[in-house]
Amino acid sequence: MRVGFGYDVHRLVEGRPLIVGGVSVPHSKGLLGHSDADVLLHAVIDALIGAAALGDIGAHFPPDDDTWKDISSVKLLKKTAGLIDAKNLRVVNIDSTVVCQSPRLSPYINDMVRTISNALGLDEGAVNVKAKTEEGLGFTGSGEGISAYSTALVEEKR
């Protein structure tokens, strides 16, 4: 068994849709990034890549490569599942936390879990997503950005 840890952060800006966990969340701002800037899925991807000892997300989906410009991070997660499979590994479970002052993400958690589990071919019971605020503290608490943390457990296929 192998464990990976992922972290990501993106700035909130006007003029972009807010996509978190592959789900469109109504908000006046969205996350700034080369792809759709889905902070949760990027943390999940980094956790999976880390568990497989394959470097980091930027090595596989470089931000200076137009192939990934505005791409859905769900597609990146599916490609990551292929990388995991190619190393003769399978995903056991994912546990993630999104840190976001606003908007309230709890109404979208089940959809996020469903999106992640579908992209990875997992039972929904193997994926957990939590949403937390920082009680107004730091860049996430002031509404400047959103961060996410994720762990992934993978094991060799039998």
Image (cartoon, rainbow, N blue to C red):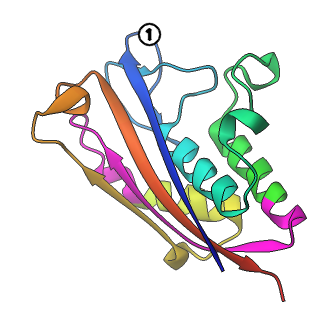
Residue 114, placed above or below residue 134: below
Q: How many marks?
A: 1
Residue 20 in view here? no
Q: Quadrant of residue 142?
A: top left
Graded by Cα atoms within 10 Å as few (under 14), some (14 to 19) or many (20 or more), the crowding at tag 1 reads few
- Residue 110 is situated, as x and y percent measured from the top left of the image, at 42, 61
Q: Is residue 107 magenta?
A: yes
Q: Quadrant of residue 89?
A: bottom right
Who is closer to the viewer here, 3 or 130?
3
Residue 63 at x, y = what percent? 69, 22
Q: Is residue 105 magenta?
A: yes
Q: Quadrant of residue 27?
A: top left
Q: Please state if 45 lies on the left or on the right of 67 as rendered.
A: left
x, y percentage for residue 123? 60, 77
Residue at the spot of label 1: 15
For the question of whether residue 67 can be seen, the reply is: yes
On screen, residue 2 versus residue 79, left or right, reads left
Give SS at disc 1.
loop
Identify the amino acid type marked 1: Gly
Q: Residue at x 73, y 16 (%)?
A: 64
Q: Which residues are magenta?
A: 84-109
Q: Position of residue 88 (x, y in %)?
A: 86, 72
Residue sitting nearer the eye, 119 or 3: 3
Residue 107 or residue 76, whichever sits in front: 76
